[in-house]
Image: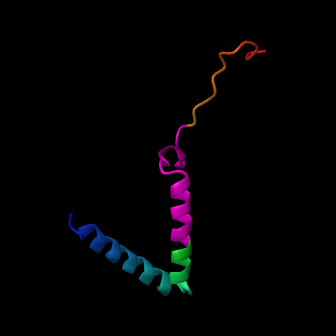
Amino acid sequence: MNDSWRDGLRLKLEAFVDAMVVNGAKQLYDAIVEKIGSLRTAYERDPDRAEDRLGADVEEPSNDWPDALR
């Protein structure tokens, strides 16, 4: 497997850091490392967040049990 995705990641991170610094961000690297740690922890708890995304359809509970419509 080649590392082309790593090159793309590096370029996007450089662009992101540049944009944040231009907008006045301070201590950016520490904040990025902290946020990556939070994301890693969240991923370990819920590795398939597909159904957690905003705007996802929420399944309604079934009302098949007796007395549900009273």
Question: Number of labelled discs?
Answer: 0
In this view, the residue farthest toward the top is 66
In the image, is residue 11 part of the stretch drawn in magenta? no
In the image, is residue 50 part of the stretch drawn in magenta?
yes
Q: How is the image coloured?
A: rainbow
Tell me the magenta residue range. 35-57
Viewer-nearest residue: 12 or 34: 34
Main secondary structure found in the magenta portion:
helix
Residue under the point 57% across and 32% down: 59
Position of residue 25 measured from the top left corner of the image (x, y, whole percent): 55, 84
Viewer-closest of 41 and 59: 41
Residue 67 x %, y %: 76, 14
Residue at x 48%, y 51% (from the top left corner)? 47
Residue found 51% across the figure and 76% down from its top: 32
Residue 4 falls left or right of residue 45 = left
Residue 28: x and y, percent? 53, 83
Quadrant in the rendering for residue 66: top right
The quarter of the image holding the C terminus is top right
Residue at the outermost right position: 70
The quarter of the displayed image where residue 2 is located: bottom left
Horizontally, residue 48 falls left or right of residue 68, namely left
Work out whether 57 lies above or below 25.
above
* Residue 7 relative to residue 62: left or right: left
Identify the image quadrant of the N terminus.
bottom left
